[in-house]
Image (spheres, rainbow, N blue to C red):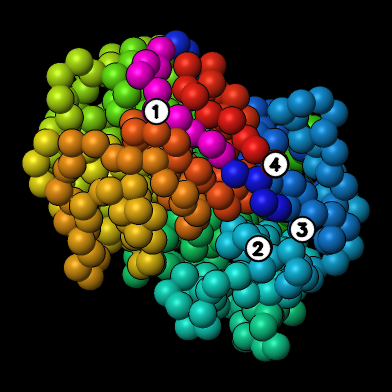
Amino acid sequence: MNDYYLVKKTDKLEGTVQVSGAKNSVLKLMAAAILIPGVTQLSNVPDIADVRLMQQVLESLGVKVSWPEAGTVRIDATTLSSHKAPYELVAHMRASTAVLGPLVARVGLASVALPGGCAIGSRKVDMHIAGLESLGASCRIEHGYIEVEAPEDGLKASDVTLEFPSVGATENLILAAVGAQGTTVVSNVAREPEISDLIDFLITAGVSIEGRGTTKLLIEGAATNKLQGGFTHKVVGDRVEAGTFLAAGALVGGPVTVTGFEAEHLSIVLKKFREAGALTEVLDNGVRIERSGPLKAVSIQTLPFPGFPTDMQAQFMALMSVAQGASVITENVFENRFMFADEIARMGADIRIEGHHALVNGVPELSGAPTVAPDLRGGASLVLAGLVARGETRVAGLQHIDRGYENFEQKLRSLGAQIERVA
C-alpha cells in the first residue's frame, strides 16, 4: 500500500470531534469472548485494521465473528474448535498474545505464535509465561510458538506479584485465572482504564473480581462453561485518540472539543497541556482545549497509568518541537519509542536522543517534508506536526496509522485541517 497523507499548514482548527472505542480495550475484549461458550456483543467498536486482524485471529480458532451494524461486533465462541493462533496473523499484531490466557482457561491448551518484533526472552513474553506458569501451566517456546498446556486436573489459583505492571501480562493473567480453581490474587497489576473495561466485561459474564482500579486483584475462578453470554458491552472511549486530537488543538490553537471519553483517563496529559500554555475545560463527556499564547517547554516522563502514557509521548514531542525553550522527554515504558524523532527532525525539529531521554529544543517553525510513519502514534504525530509546518508535509506508511485511528483524516478535516489521503 503506497497511500500517503498530504498535509498543509492549517491556520485554524475549530469544532467538535467524537472519538471511537479504545483500540487497546476492544482487542482484549474480543480475546476475552473466547472464555464464554455463547454469544457476546461489543458496541462502540472502531473499524480499524487491528480489529479486523483480531477478527481473523478469532475466526482461525473457529469463533464466529460478525458486524450486525457499524460499530457493533457479535462474537459466538460456542464453536471454538482450535487452540492454535497462526504466525501469519499474530506476526502483525502484538495484542494477539491476549488469546493465550482465555484459550488455556477454556480448553487447557494454547499455541500462539510469538508476536512480530518480539525477541525471545523479552520482558513481555517472559511475564506472560511466568504468570501462566504460576497457575500450574507448562509453557515452552518451540518453532516460533508459545506452547501452553494446563495440567490434567486444570489450572490452580495462586498468589502472583508482577515484576512490572505490564498491561498485556495483567490481562492474560486475569483471563487465565478465570478458569483456575480457587481465588487468584495478583499484585502490582496495571491499572489502565482498559484493564477496568476488561474487568467490567468479565463481571457481566459472571466472573467475581475484586480490586478494580487498584494494584491488587482477587479473581475467583469459575468453570468457563458456566459463564453467561447474551449481553452487549460498550467499549470505553479511546483516551489516546482523544489525546491526539487535543494535542492538535493545543498545537494549532483551537478551540477544539473532543467527546466520547472520560477526562480522568487523561488527567496527567491535561495537566501537561496546561503547563505548556493551553487552556482545558473538562466537560461531562470530554474536554475542550484552546491556546492563544505561545507554547512553553515542559518536560515529561512516561510511566504506567496513572502516569503519562507512552502512547502520548510522540504527540507531546510534536508539541514541544515548536515550544519556547528546552524540554526533556523520558521514555520509561518501551525501548525504541523515539523513532518518531528522526522523522520530525526532517521537518526541522531540534531533537537529540541520549539513551531513553530526548532533549527537545523548540524551534520557531517546522517546514514541510516527505516523512514515513515509523509506528502508529509516531505516524499520527507526523500529521500533527504537518498542521503547523510551513508548506506541505507528506506522511507515508499509513498502514501504521490505520491500525489505530478510525476515519483519522475525515475527523481532522471536520475541524478544518488541510489533509487529504492520496492513493
Report if residue 359 is visible in the image. yes
- 25 lies left or right of 16: right
SS at circle 2: loop
Q: Earlier in the sequence, mark 2 or mark 1?
A: 1
Residue under pointer 4: 423
Residue under pointer 3: 57
Q: Earlier in the sequence, mark 1 or mark 4?
A: 1
- Numbered range of the magenta stretch: 5-14
What's the distance in space between the residues labelled 2 and 3, CA to CA?
Answer: 11 Å
SS at circle 3: helix
Q: Is residue 69 above or below residue 376?
A: above
Q: Is residue 89 above or below residue 347?
A: below
What's the distance in space between the residues labelled 4 and 2, CA to CA?
Answer: 22 Å
Mark carried by residue 9:
1
Q: Nearer the viewer, residue 171 or 68?
A: 68
What's the distance in space between the residues labelled 2 and 1, CA to CA?
Answer: 33 Å
Q: Earlier in the sequence, mark 4 or mark 2?
A: 2
Picture coordinates of residue 163 (x, y %)? 34, 70
Picture coordinates of residue 261 (x, y %)? 46, 25
Between marks 4 and 2 in the image, the one whose residue lies nearer the viewer? 4
Amino acid type at circle 4 is Ala
- 329 lies left or right of 124: left
Bin the neighbour count of mark 2 within 10 Å (Cα to Cα): few under 14, some 14-19, many 20 and up: some
Q: Is residue 201 above or below residue 342?
A: above
Between marks 3 and 4 in the image, the one whose residue lies nearer the viewer? 4
Residue under pointer 2: 92
Amino acid type at circle 1 is Lys
- 349 lies left or right of 3: left
Helix, strand or loop for the magenta stretch, by majority: loop
Bin the neighbour count of mark 1 within 10 Å (Cα to Cα): few under 14, some 14-19, many 20 and up: many
Bin the neighbour count of mark 3 within 10 Å (Cα to Cα): few under 14, some 14-19, many 20 and up: many
Q: Is residue 406 magenta?
A: no
